[in-house]
Image (cartoon, rainbow, N blue to C red):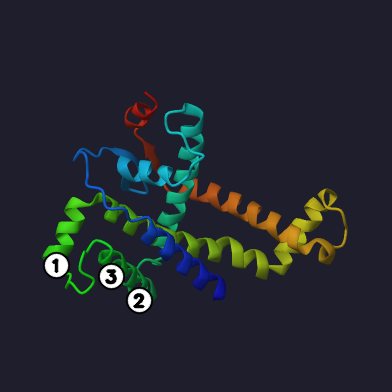
Amino acid sequence: MEKRFHFRKLLVSLLVAASVVVKAQTSVDPTVMNVAGKDVPLSEFVYIAGKNSEVNLADSASLGTYLELFKKFKLKVAEAESLGMDTTQSFVNELKGYQEQLLKSYSKDSGEVLTPDKIRHIEQNYPEYKHLMQEYRDGILLFEVSDREVWSRASSDAAGLETFFEQTKQKYTSGNLEAVRGEVIADYQSWLDNQWTKRLADKYPIKVYWEVLKKLTK
């Protein structure tokens, strides 16, 4: 619970700090991929890439690496949605609270009443607002579903951890699980995540629009 609270608090702070008000340069926003029946606009793909200084979309190798990570991210969000994690009251309340906080950063008057018309104006004229909301929403879902499928499971599944250790103990400095428990749990989490991601790739269809993607490297 404490880990979840600190993660979300940090996420809110970072996203609000990043909300630099810049108007859209173009209304054209092609679909770069479809994950589990949901279109992903190119602007979102590029926006998330811009948060990582190691990603160079003009370089085909860097683009390819980022594409695979982005697909895994969207697959996990799709799984969270299929589990109804985006419909819980706690999720709805948290997202609403963040929205209210974020909208204030677009108002010159801290006491201004944000009417529905004002909110629509922001949504239509400041595309980064939409990206920030999407990023925060997906970030919460990613955290929750990863905690369920990987982090908490790796810590609580004693039998699974023991089996994993027995199968991989040759790589550790000790044959005693307790002596290397932290390292084994970290490796078990990575293994669980890889296996889970493979299952998601089989479960949800992904279509990449390469003609759109390739334009980024030109």
Compared across the picture, whether 53 is left or right of 186 comes to left
Viewport quadrant of the C terminus: top left
- Tell me the amino acid under the disc marked 1: Pro
Q: Is residue 145 above or below residue 207?
A: below
What is the number of the mark on residue 100? 3
> Quadrant of the rendered structure where residue 215 is?
top left
Q: Residues within 10 Å of mark 2 (few under 14, many from 20)?
A: few
Which of the pair 117/144 is nearer the observer?
A: 117
The residue lying at 37 percent from left, 43 percent from top is 45
The residue lying at 67 percent from left, 68 percent from top is 155
Residue occupied by mark 1: 116
Compared across the picture, whether 101 is left or right of 68 comes to left
Label 1 SS: helix
Label 2 SS: helix
> Quadrant of the rendered structure where residue 210 is?
top left
Which of the pair 21/99 is nearer the observer?
A: 21
Residue occupied by mark 2: 89
Given the current orientation, which residue lies at the most extreme left position?
117
Label 3 SS: helix
- Tell me the amino acid under the disc marked 3: Glu
What is the number of the mark on residue 48? none
Compared across the picture, whether 178 is left or right of 216 comes to right
Which tag, 2 or 3, sits closer to the chain's start?
2
Viewport quadrant of the N terminus: bottom right
Mark 2 and mark 3: Cα distance apart in space: 16 Å
The percent position of residue 191, horizontal first and vertical second, equals 65, 52
